[in-house]
Amino acid sequence: LTQEFQLIYQFCEFVMENAKNVITLQTTLQCFLRFLFWVPLYYAFETPLIDMLLHKFFPQPHFRCDALQCLTEVAAIDPKSVDAKYHPKVQKMYADFITNLSRIVQPEAIKQYHEEGDQGEEFVQRLTLMLSTILKTHLPILETQELVWFLIQGLQYLVHISEVDDDEIFKICTEYWNFLADD
């Protein structure tokens, strides 16, 4: 299975690095998302995948939601299967994510962003899933002195997202706040 994934990864990486067509890139990201569930950890943490998603695709409106879904799958990797040598990569992924997110939208503007239409709604829903997933799954390794500001920012986003008038988003936020309160 790992051998087959290597070929799929190489193909997707080649397309993501070289294609210029928006539809081709969106389709490749969506295809890649289907394989991320069973990706060997090596491909998530020792290839340019995370940086490509964070710095090439997430900042661009055309690819933002697809990149968020892929990042959420990476964030959902069971921490018990993540070797301690990858903890700095998870920490960097989170810090870079919050940095890039703050360039797209400030926490106070989330509600307005959500109200801008279907794309805004989809973005906020995907953002809610990403933040709640990474904070639930990897909170112990994100709770470092270096990441305090980023953690506070992530929580501020979730506070403002909680104010959005959307039942599904509110449910995701409530589940996260319940998790945090129990922790």
Image (cartoon, rainbow, N blue to C red):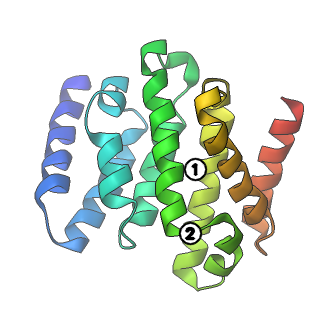
Furthest toward the top, the residue is: 84
Identify the residue under disc 1: 130
Q: Is residue 18 left or right of residue 52?
A: left
User: What separation in Å lies between label 1 and label 2 (alpha carbons)?
Assistant: 15 Å
Q: Position of residue 50 (x, y in %)?
A: 35, 42
Closer to the chain start, of discs 1 and 2, is 2
Q: Amino acid at mark 1?
A: Met
- Residue 133 or 51: which is nearer the viewer? 51
Camera-near label (1 vs 2) is 2
The quadrant in which the C terminus is found is top right
Q: Is residue 93 left or right of residue 55?
A: right
Residue 121's disc is none
Q: Residue at x 46, y 64 (%)?
A: 65
Q: Residues within 10 Å of mark 1 (few under 14, many from 20)?
A: many
Up/down of 42 relative to 51, above or below: above
Up/down of 132 relative to 161, above or below: above
Up/down of 56 relative to 141, above or below: below
Q: Residue at x 66, y 83 (%)?
A: 115
- Residue 46 or 171: which is nearer the viewer? 46
Q: Residues within 10 Å of mark 2 (few under 14, many from 20)?
A: few
Q: Position of residue 106 (x, y in %)?
A: 61, 67
Q: Is residue 149 left or right of residue 161?
A: left
Q: Do tag 1 and tag 2 residues touch (Cβ < 8 Å)?
A: no
Q: Position of residue 136 (x, y in %)?
A: 68, 36
Mark 2 element type: loop
Q: Quadrant of residue 157?
A: bottom right
Q: Quadrant of residue 4?
A: top left
Q: Position of residue 59 (x, y in %)?
A: 39, 63
Q: Amino acid at mark 2?
A: Val
Identify the residue under disc 2: 105
Mark 1 element type: helix
